């Protein structure tokens, strides 16, 4: 009887620890919730130090709309989304709006936002002005994230 109880306890601990992996968050999420509820995002946010050049580049996004499509389960999202949050925080750029939309493993969300933007890879950052898409950065930037987000603006 004691062996069964010990085995049951041993098996239940890893299952509880993996609960986030079973059902990734899907839907709109605030940066506060993202950084407080997901350790990998918080760790990357704290580890990233933007350059002065990248902070200055972020000012080109003034008044623009930004849509961030990502997965809480995605390693590229773990790396890039916290960088964006830190760049926005450090630059104090005033965006018209910013929406963080997490998707499931199928790269969809219940509201259909990812599908409306034809999401293929995570993360995807979309810069818009008056509803018109200006810039799309997919998965990982070719330069720095700030350079790619502001390219051509």
Image: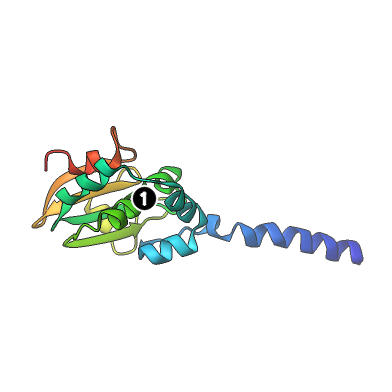
Asked whether 105 or 139 is in front, the reply is 139
The quarter holding residue 6 reads bottom right
Res 9 → quadrant: bottom right
Name the residue rendered at 24%, 60% in the picture. 98
Q: Is residue 100 visible?
A: yes
On the picture, is 2 further left or further right than 59? Answer: right
Quarter holding the N terminus is bottom right
Q: Position of residue 13 (x, y in %)?
A: 71, 61
Position in image of residue 137 (x %, y %): 25, 42
Element type at marker 1?
Answer: helix
Q: Residue 118, can we see it?
A: no
Depicted 33 relative to depicted 71: above or below: below
Q: Residue at x 17, y 39 (%)?
A: 151
Residue 144 coordinates in the image, percent (x, y):
29, 37
Q: What residue do we see at 27% from left, 61% from top?
A: 99
Is 45 drawn above or below residue 13 in the view shown?
above
118, 141: nearer the viewer: 141
In what quadrant of the picture does the C terminus appear?
top left
Residue carrying label 1: 81
Looking at the image, residue 23 lies above or below residue 81:
below
Q: Find residue 135 and report its image quarter.
A: top left
Image position of 153 (left or right of 30)? left
């Amino acid at each position: 009887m004691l062996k069964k109880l010990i085995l049951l306890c041993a098996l239940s601990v890893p299952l509880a620890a993996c609960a986030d992996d079973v059902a990734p968050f899907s839907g709109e999420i605030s940066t506060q919730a993202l950084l407080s509820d997901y350790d990998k995002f918080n760790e990357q946010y704290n580890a990233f130090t933007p350059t002065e050049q990248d902070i200055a580049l972020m000012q080109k996004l003034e008044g623009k709309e930004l849509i961030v499509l990502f997965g809480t389960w995605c390693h590229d999202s773990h790396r890039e989304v916290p960088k964006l949050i830190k760049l926005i925080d450090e630059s104090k750029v005033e965006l018209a709006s910013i929406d963080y939309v997490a998707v499931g493993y199928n790269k969809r969300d219940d509201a259909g936002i990812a599908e409306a933007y034809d999401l293929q890879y995570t993360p995807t950052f979309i810069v818009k002005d008056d509803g018109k898409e200006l810039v799309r950065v997919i998965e990982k930037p070719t330069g720095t994230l700030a350079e790619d987000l502001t390219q051509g603006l």
